[in-house]
């Protein structure tokens, strides 16, 4: 269960952004909508432990982000949270396979090539496993990003504009793959977007003002 | 996958940067290491060839030239010393001299110098016989190890010497009797390896025959006056036959009995370092037609002269190393800009700041260590070529296969440079602000 209470964040020199309290059960899939500047990405980063709130706190399961050291939080994130960004930003010097092995290693999991191949198979990019990321198309790169987000079987998957750089066909595919992959590992999925192509696919929606 | 492995992959991903950095680093390290290699071996040769000689006495001229020609066999001799005037120095009961080894220089065989001397020279360099025996008769020679090897000389071989110190077929003493090899020395690492050693009388014999023949081939007595100018020994025409006999049949006469002959120089060891000995050099310089040069002083002077060039090269090498450090710094720093998103993403995947710090430091270290090994390969590779050149032009054998402990220090220095060049980029990477970087990219 993911829970945020009384969360606010203040960028220096501007008024604080207050976020509505929010709770998601294991397996829930949420879409977080809002205009530019409404703090969608900020909320996502707060929920992912990439940013510390000015006030309030976030808990994932028994784990309260505010009460643990930065080192524990980094480790916790690697083990329990998968994040998909607008672009994959995979390590350019490593192949797709090596990127995913690195993800397993950083997440403290055992290295499992077969598991990665199965995952790539499901995402239809198994044939690209030994290619460098920059040789892949935008759609393929986002599949790599999804693979990276789910390979460690996290409890929480966060996606920040995962489809906005893609054409309609790829957008639909990536959206479906994201949902299926989250389901497959029974993770909470939170997608932040202003991409209207996604709205119909999510029943649970949170609107930021 | 270790951090080191990831660093390695990152470096390989930028091959052009890698090549540039390696070339610069290797040039710097290579130059320093080459300087050391040459320097150490040169000093080693100079030390070995010193062989405890306190004084070199020869004809007036440049004292450095006298030392170089007589002790190191590098330069041309300064001139001749008539035995009649040098008699005092050749006295075995000299009150100050423990030993004085006479040298007669000026002839060579296929570029290797032939030295007319006595057995003292072989003892001086503590040379042992690999084969054969000491010269006893005139025209018998003992050859140094390098000469034997490079000219493929065996016992019993015969050859004719050439006038002068360079290889020139036109200057061969065709009319003189040939030398015969009776002994081959073991390698000593000193200059005697490059020498062909014979009795002083053999050298005289070659030149006697030579001038004698030369006279016969010209139109007899008419040219007598000219010969006086051309040849030191030609003036004593009438005694020639007589001398000749003497050389052939009474070889054990001391050199002092050949009053009309000349030698090139004397290598002197003192009995002790007393005031008399120390004043000896000045006395000779002031009161005789000869000069006396102290090897230690002249070689120090040479080092000082060479030192300027060496310092300049060293400064240049350090400058190149500094630039290569800067180049590593710049390429790491600019690669951070390209990689800032992937570094931030690695942080979201659970990488600690220390992970990114080590990642970049290792990149600096890998480049500098690779650069170091390229540099060492470069210097030893150049040494192979240089040794060949030095061997050909100076008959000095240098080795490329010598590894110095200084090269370990250079390795340490390389590591330090790699770390220093990487430390600011590494610090920057470890400070990656995940939120700012990844929110910024939203566009």
Image (spheres, coloured by chain):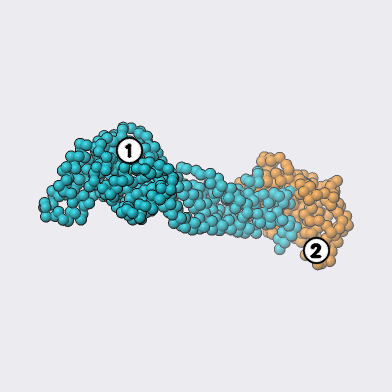
Chain colours: A orange, B cyan
Residue drawn at x 33%, y 36% is: B184
Query: For this view, does B219 lie left or right of residue A19?
Result: left
Q: Nearer the viewer, residue B69 or B25?
A: B69
* Residue B2 % position (x, y): 65, 44
Above or below, B19 against B205 in this view is below
Chain under callout 2: A
Determine crowd level at label 1: few under 14, some 14-19, many 20+ residues with C-alpha closer than 10 A.
some
* Residue B203 % position (x, y): 25, 44
Residue drawn at x 84%, y 66% is: A15
Per the image, the residue denoted by label 1 is B119
The C terminus of chain A, quarter of image: bottom right
| Label annotation for residue A190 | none
What is the C-alpha distance between the residues marked 2 and 1?
A: 94 Å
Count of numbered circles in the view: 2
* Residue B397 % position (x, y): 39, 44
The answer to whether marks 2 and 1 mark residues whose Cβ atoms lie closer than 8 Å is: no
Q: Quadrant of residue B135?
A: top left
Q: Is residue A18 visible?
A: yes
Between disc 2 and disc 1, the foreground one is 1
Q: Secondary structure at mark 1?
A: loop
Above or below, A87 against B109 in this view is below
Chain under callout 1: B
Q: Is residue A174 visible?
A: no
* Residue A200 % position (x, y): 79, 57
Query: For this view, does B181 lie left or right of residue B53?
Result: left
Residue drawn at x 72%, y 61% is: B440
Query: For this view, does B295 lie left or right of residue A5?
Result: left
| Label annotation for residue A11 | 2
Determine crowd level at label 2: few under 14, some 14-19, many 20+ residues with C-alpha closer than 10 A.
few
Q: Both on one chain, marks 2 and 1?
A: no
């Amino acid at each position: 269960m993911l829970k945020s209470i009384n969360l606010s964040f203040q960028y220096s020199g501007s008024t604080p952004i207050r976020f509505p309290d929010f709770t998601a059960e294991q397996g829930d899939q949420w879409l977080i909508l809002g205009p530019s500047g409404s703090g969608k990405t900020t909320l996502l980063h707060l929920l992912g432990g990439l940013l510390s709130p000015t006030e309030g706190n976030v808990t994932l399961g028994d784990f309260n982000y505010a009460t643990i050291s930065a080192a524990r939080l980094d480790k916790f994130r690697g083990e329990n949270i998968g994040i998909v960004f607008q672009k994959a930003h995979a390590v350019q010097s490593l192949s797709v396979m090596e990127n995913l092995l690195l993800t397993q290693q950083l997440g403290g999991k055992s290295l499992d090539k077969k598991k990665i191949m199965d995952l790539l198979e499901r995402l239809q990019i198994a044939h690209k496993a030994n290619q460098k990321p920059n040789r892949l198309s935008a759609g393929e790169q986002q599949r790599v990003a999804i693979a990276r987000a789910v390979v460690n079987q996290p409890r929480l998957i966060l996606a920040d504009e995962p489809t906005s750089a893609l054409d309609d066909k790829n957008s639909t595919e990536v959206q479906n793959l994201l949902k299926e992959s989250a389901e497959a590992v029974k993770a909470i999925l939170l997608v932040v977007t202003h991409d209207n192509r996604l709205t119909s696919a999510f029943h649970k929606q949170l609107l930021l003002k | 996958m270790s951090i080191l492995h990831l660093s390695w992959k990152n470096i390989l991903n930028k091959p052009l940067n890698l090549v540039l950095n390696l070339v610069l680093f290797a040039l710097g390290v290579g130059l320093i290491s080459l300087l050391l290699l040459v320097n150490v071996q040169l000093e080693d040769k100079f030390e070995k060839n010193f062989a405890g000689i306190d004084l070199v006495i020869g004809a007036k001229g440049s004292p450095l030239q006298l030392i170089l020609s007589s002790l190191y066999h590098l330069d041309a001799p300064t001139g001749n010393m008539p035995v009649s005037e040098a008699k005092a120095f050749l006295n075995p009961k000299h009150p100050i001299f423990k030993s004085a080894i006479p040298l007669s220089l000026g002839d060579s065989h296929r570029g290797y110098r032939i030295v007319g001397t006595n057995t003292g020279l072989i003892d001086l360099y503590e040379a042992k016989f690999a084969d054969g025996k000491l010269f006893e008769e005139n025209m018998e020679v003992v050859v140094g190890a390098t000469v034997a090897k490079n000219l493929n000389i065996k016992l019993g071989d015969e050859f004719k010497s050439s006038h002068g110190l360079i290889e020139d077929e036109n200057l061969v003493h065709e009319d003189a009797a040939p030398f015969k090899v009776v002994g081959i020395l073991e390698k000593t690492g000193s200059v005697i390896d490059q020498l062909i050693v014979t009795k002083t009388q053999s050298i005289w014999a070659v030149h006697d025959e030579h001038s004698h023949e030369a006279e016969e081939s010209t139109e007899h007595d008419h040219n007598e006056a000219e010969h006086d100018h051309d040849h030191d020994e030609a003036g004593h025409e009438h005694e020639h036959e007589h001398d000749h006999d003497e050389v052939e049949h009474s070889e054990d006469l001391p050199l002092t009995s050949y009053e009309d002959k000349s030698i090139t120089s004397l290598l002197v060891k003192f009995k002790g370092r007393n005031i008399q000995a120390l004043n000896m050099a000045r006395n000779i310089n002031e009161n005789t037609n000869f000069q006396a040069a102290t090897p230690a002083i002249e070689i120090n002077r040479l080092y000082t002269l060479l030192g300027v060039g060496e310092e300049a090269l060293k400064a240049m090498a350090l400058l190149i190393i500094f630039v290569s450090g800067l180049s590593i710094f710049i390429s790491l720093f600019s690669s951070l800009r390209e990689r800032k998103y992937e570094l931030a993403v690695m942080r979201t995947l659970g990488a600690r700041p220390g992970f990114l710090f080590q990642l970049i430091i290792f990149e600096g270290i890998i480049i500098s260590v690779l650069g170091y090994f390229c540099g060492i390969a470069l210097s030893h590779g150049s040494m192979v070529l240089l040794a060949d050149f030095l061997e050909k032009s100076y008959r000095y054998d240098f080795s490329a296969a010598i590894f110095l402990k200084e090269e370990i220090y250079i390795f340490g220095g390389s590591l330090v440079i790699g770390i220093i060049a990487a430390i600011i980029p590494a610090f920057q990477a470890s400070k990656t602000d995940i939120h700012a970087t990844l929110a910024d990219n939203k566009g």
